[in-house]
Image (cartoon, helix red, strand yellow):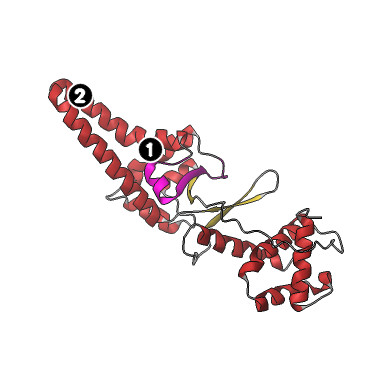
Amino acid sequence: MPLQADARQERRTHAHAAQGLPAPMLDTYREVVTPEGVALHLPAAGPVPRALAWGIDFVIRGTIMLVMGMLLGVLGGLGQGLYLVGMFLVFWAYPIVLEAAWHGQTPGKRVLGLRVVSGDGAPLGWLPAIVRNLLRTVDMLPVGYAAALVSCLCDRHGRRLGDRVANTVVVHVLSHRAHPQVPVVPPQPLPQPLQLPEQVALVAFGERSVRLAPARQAELADLLSPLTGARGLAGARQLLGMANWVLGRR
């Protein structure tokens, strides 16, 4: 159906806009098709927001270590041993436990609106969280996460080496409150049966119509004049009526 490709790209652009993100110059969405045949589009995060999230987490962990050092310093040798144990837990258990138990987010990722998910879009499990974070030792090489930066820049989904091995991806968390609605107009029965992807494209046109200029609405509607039997804005209104019919507004 002619509207399908345009509808997918438009939804991706407005998904970024709904979250206050710039429209992507390159399509960084990772498309995953579920066993039920539903296509999920995961908006992959690039190296810049990921680095900022890491920086926030680094400050938090550094603050924890500073406070811990002040409190354990009075215990002498015992305090030093406890401090080393605490350092290990803060720098290694901190990201693993939080990502696995807190919906794939650390405080830094939460502030930046990021989340780690499995490669198929499922919630992050414990094993992938452990693998991706233990492999930071490789991503750090040779200095300053250089290997991770090169990997992110070379991968269309912005994955570092740890993500590739663990089959995970860091995505932007999009707001669902800004989901567009199809304008309510008198429903029009479909003149002929439409396949599910065609119905989805019809609804997508209705969702985007409020953000399209009348000339653009008419241009898209003319592509489906054989279906609507009308052209221009009259055809666009017919498409809106069909979209309302598909949504069950009878």
Q: Which residues are magenta?
A: 104-122
* Label 2 neighbour load within 10 Å: few <14, some 14-19, many 20+: few
**What's the CA distance linking mark 2 and mark 1?**
22 Å
Q: Is residue 147 left or right of residue 185?
A: left
Which label is found at residue 95?
1
- Disc 2 secondary structure class: helix
Q: Which residue is mark 2?
A: 81
Residue at image x 54%, y 57%?
29
The amino acid beneath tag 2 is: Gly
Reading the chain from its start, which is encountered first: label 2 or label 1? 2
Q: Is residue 217 above or below residue 198?
A: below
Does residue 108 belong to the magenta stretch?
yes
- Total residue callouts: 2
Task: Please determine whether, in this image, residue 50 is positioned above or below residue 223.
Answer: above
Image coords of residue 169 (percent x, y): 49, 47
Q: In which quadrant of the rendered image does the N terminus lie?
A: bottom right
